[in-house]
Image (spheres, rainbow, N blue to C red):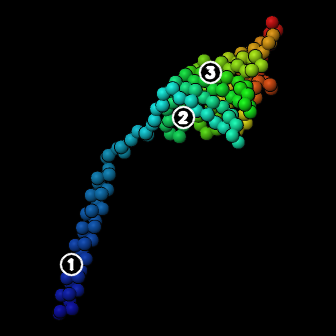
Amino acid sequence: MKGFLESWKGWELNYKVKTIETLCLFLLILSCCGKEKEIRPTPSSEIKKSILTSSKSGKKTWRLTSEKITMKDNKTYLYNLKLELFKGDSLECTITGNEGIIDGDKISLKGSITASTKIGATLTTSSLNFSEKTNFLSTDDRVSFIKKDLILKGSGFVADRSFGNVKIKKDVEVVFK
């Protein structure tokens, strides 16, 4: 009889533990139901009137001046900016725009974009991308490109950073002054 009582007490204790575990699990599940997940904003930083510079092998590749820079979600947002592209120690191209984003090795500008080179070429458009990896400028938007006595207009544009090689993709208009 003694063995039976010890067995009964063990079963009773085991039953109580299982009941408490089940109750805790039920309360945990119940506490999660019906609640929306709390959304916490991603922290961001803001810098005013700043200059960013990129270089390779000790040589400046670009310098970016911006009235305001914010950083969020691993991207850098730029406002009222000037991007200067260099080759060696020589300034090749200056680009101004209302807004921009740096995302990895790509700088995307939008708004009223004007780009001018040391050879006297000027590009105007509403968006422009610069790839530091390929050293090319590009857009799919309408462009106006002026070089000496030549005016090119069209949609889509690809060029190297000095505008030595230029391609307008479609709807090309050519005007000689």
Q: Which amino acid type is shown beneath numbered disc 3?
A: Thr
How far is disc 1 from disc 3 in space, using C-alphas? Answer: 80 Å
168 or 55, which is in the foreground? Answer: 55
Q: Residue at x 59, y 37 (%)?
A: 103
Report if residue 140 is visible in the image.
no
Circle 2 sits in a helix, a strand or a loop, which is it? Answer: strand
Q: Residue at x 71, y 30 (%)?
A: 86
Circle 3 sits in a helix, a strand or a loop, which is it? Answer: strand
Which residue is identified by label 2? 76
Q: In which image quadrant can residue 61 be found?
A: top right
27 or 75, which is in the foreground? Answer: 75
Q: Quadrant of the C terminus?
A: top right
What label sits on residue 12 in the rendered view?
Answer: 1
The picture places residue 141, in percent across and down from the top left corner, at 67, 22
Which residue is identified by label 3? 96
Q: Is residue 170 above or below residue 149?
A: below
Q: In which image quadrant can residue 80 be found?
A: top right
Q: Are marks 2 and 3 in contact (CB under 8 Å)?
A: no
The picture places residue 101, in percent across and down from the top left corner, at 57, 31
Q: Residue at x 76, y 29 (%)?
A: 160
Circle nearer the N terminus (2, 3): 2
